[in-house]
Amino acid sequence: MESGSLSVVIPVYNEEENVGPLHEQLQAALANWPGEVEFLFVDDGSTDATLEILKRAQMADPRIRIARFRRNLGQTAAMGAGFHLAKGHAVVTLDGDLQNDPAEIPRLVPMLADYDVVCGIRTRRQDTWWKRRSSRIANGFRNWVTKDDIVDTGCTLKAYRRECVERLELYNGMHRFLPTLLRMRGFRVAQVPVSHRPRRAGKTKYDTWRRMKKGLADVWAVRWMKKNWIPYEAVLEVVETPENVEVRSQESV
């Protein structure tokens, strides 16, 4: 794919009722996209008909690419696989449960002209009171420990320049800290409000309390990485000796 191309990465796990409507909404949202587009679904070991529905949709739309784990590995693994497989100049991630609106994509991607990462902030969240409350606690704690200001780490809807994520190595749970990890590497991060929709079908795949405990534990690992990160590329200079320059000149003749 050339510059201006777009990869939409969607991790899915047992979303048989949602992947069909999601594909239709992606088609509508990106019908006038000026570059090449791919819809990269990463099936995280689904045990329902999710994979079969995606295969049927792929027969009608060659822009669909499907990757599949033989067993469930979690959202971080699915997202990491999508990053490595994506071909687009820009990479957008969104959930497979229809709570993220694909119509937001054409608004977020052009912002990559000025930023390297654009993070969505869910407004008027369509989740339970407990889920919203636990997210606020977790986000506040993460920012306090890591000295960052990411408002909504749990919002999957994000746009990236591909060079930000193509070589990124993720560990379980680290997808929640992507903006912080990328800022450590010198990338520019923006945050913008995005819409949020209620889940219409299927069930959430994450236990809120267990996820919060895992996230609060992981934050200390991120703090350690941030404290001990060595930004050597910013001060690295390769010094050529006269002998090396002479040898290279002779080899090029």
Image (cartoon, helix red, strand yellow):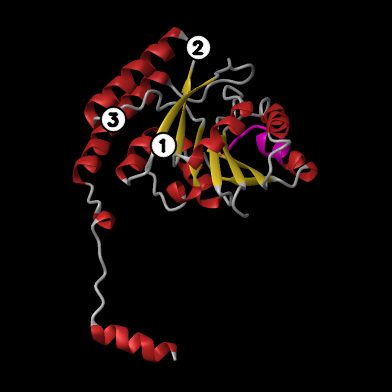
Outermost residue to the right: 60
Sequence-first disc among 2 and 1: 2
Q: Quadrant of residue 64?
A: top right
Mark 3: few, some, or many residues within 10 Å (few <14, many ≥20)? some
Q: Which residue is mark 3?
A: 148
Q: Which residue is mark 2?
A: 124
Is residue 230 left or right of 37 when viewed as pictured? left
Residue range in magenta is 44-54
Across and down, in percent, residue 39 comes to 65, 41
Across and down, in percent, residue 151 comes to 37, 23
Q: Nearer the viewer, residue 194 or 21?
A: 194
- Could you tell me which residue is drawn at 43 percent across and 26 percent down? 154
- Could you tell me which residue is drawn at 58 percent across and 17 percent down? 197
Sequence-first disc among 2 and 3: 2
Query: Could you tell me which quadrant the N terminus lies in?
Result: bottom right
- From the viewer's perspective, is residue 83 above or below residue 235? above
Q: Which residue is mark 1?
A: 175
